[in-house]
Image (cartoon, rainbow, N blue to C red):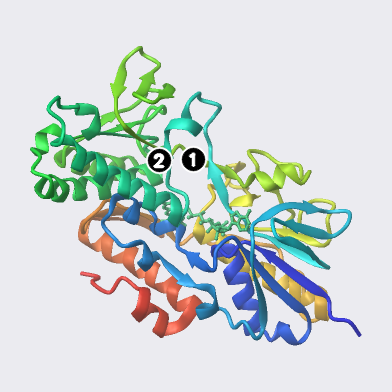
Amino acid sequence: KKKPRIVILGAGYAGIMTASRLTKAGMHHEADITLVNKHNYHYQTTWLHEPAAGTLHHDKTRMKIENVIDTNKVNFVKGAVKTIDREGKKVLLENGELEYDYLVVGLGSVPETFGIPGVQEHAFAIRSVNSVRLIREHIEYKFASYNNEDEKHDEYLTFVVAGAGFTGIEFVGELSERVPELCEEYDIDRDKVRIVSVEAAPTALPGFDEELVEYAMNLLESRGVEFKINTPIKEVTENGVLLDDGEEIKSHTVVWTTGVRGNPIIENSGFEAMRGRVKVEKDLRAPDHDDVFIIGDCSLIINEEINRPYPPTAQIAIQQAYTCAGNLKHLVTGKGEMEAFEPDIKGTVASLGGKEAIGLVGSKKVYGGSASAVKKMIDNRYLFMLGGMPLVLKKGKLNIF
Ligand code: FAD
């Protein structure tokens, strides 16, 4: 009897954890499992603000897929997915095609631009190892250029971060720690450098506890960060940003962190979506598709307590992978049961650079050094789930306190 083919798209949190769970359950004996990813490595999206600012080397955030997934059990295909042919039950890649009996889509997200002109052309995004390496290099280049020109260009040293949500604040935190080092290295006065956090909503970190937001803003302001809250950006140009209130901030570095939408492959493949995300059934399958699971940032699930979507997070992506792997096991072997996905939100911690962070653990507020320690433990816990202690020792954050 021919074994059913399970194809997993994307080796981010959602995809790689699904592959890992399937092999741990011995599913490679029951099905042919294929994992497809653009790169031959898995990276930690939640750490990318650090290599973007240059406070951590990008190699710390990534690992070869063959080192965390047993390639005798899972067939790894390095390739970029172009589209999903739902009727033909196959996936078109840049370099071939793959047929499936069951598909898991974990292709992550892309920046949400809200159609604001110039974002695609002129802003940077914290999205992948490639994109953050470019940001780090660009920032250093601007510092290095400054003293090489007789006429001084302040816009070289003005850094605009669009969006003061989770990612924007984490990046600003890292950058505010990095800037003094860069000033020293390139003989530049700290006063010459501006870091401007621009947010359209009436508060930074919308949705976060007010006291924690205040702590974060005070800390970042003490490191020289300027906040422009309640200030929508009208346009990004090659010279900087134009704000709704008419002001122009001249800057050669605009980093766009105003939230995400699901990978465009979802919409291009004809799935019905909201901001590129498919509102999945309780068992994580796409509506009207009994052979397609959609998890991670490509999926949308509703928090029934407030009747609004959960924000997409790694925490949810990982938990969905567990449910998805269990449900695949049921479909292939008939064992166990189809389970409904229930997120179990353990808390949220945002790093602020250095040994500073804020967050909620359960319903407890945490600040400063203890929050930062919790953040590192969360990061290490994931590595432990994926590759046990050896991976924690190799890639973990071991300077916890
Ligand atoms: P990803 O982890 O992004 O993985 C998608 C994968 O698909 C990638 O490996 C990519 O290379 C691959 N891929 C994409 N397109 C293709 C293609 N066409 N073909 C083949 N492969 C492709 N969440 C938290 O829970 N806690 C946090 O503290 C937190 N901090 C964050 C900080 C930052 C700076 C950012 C940017 C995000 C943060 N998040 C956090 C959100 C979290 O990173 C995402 O929700 C999570 O990565 C989603 O997982 P995923 O598996 O859906 O996508």
In the picture, the disc for residue 19 is none
The residue to which callout 2 is attached is 165
Q: CA distance from mark 1 to mark 2?
A: 8 Å
Classify mark 2 as within 8 Å of ligand 1 or not, answering yes or no.
no
Comparing 308 with 117, the one in front is: 117
In the picture, measured across the screen, residue 233 lies left or right of residue 213, that is: right
Q: Give the quadrant of the N terminus.
A: bottom right
Q: Secondary structure at mark 1?
A: loop
Dots 1, 2 in contact, CB < 8 A: yes
Quadrant the C terminus occupies: bottom left
**Residue at the disc numbered 1:** 259
Q: Is residue 216 above or below residue 41?
A: above
Residue 310: percent from left, percent from top: 56, 48
Q: Residues within 10 Å of mark 1 (few under 14, many from 20)?
A: many
Residue 300 visible in rendering: no
Residue 316, position as x, y percentages in the image: 55, 59
Label 2 secondary element: loop
Q: Quarter-wise, where is residue 244 in the image?
A: top left
The residue under the point 77% across, 45% down is 271
Amino acid under label 2?
A: Gly
User: Which residue sits at x=31%, y=31%?
Assistant: 252
Which of the two discs, 1 and 2, labels the residue nearer the N terminus? 2
Q: Identify the residue shown where x is 70% and y is 60%.
A: 95
Residue 308 in percent (x, y) is at 59, 41
Q: What amino acid type is highlighted by mark number 1?
A: Gly
| 183 w.r.t. 66: above or below | above
Q: Residue furthest right?
A: 1
Would you call the spot at circle 2 few (<14 residues within 10 Å), some (14-19), or many (20 or more)?
many
213 or 87: nearer the eye?
Answer: 87
Q: Is residue 167 visible?
A: yes
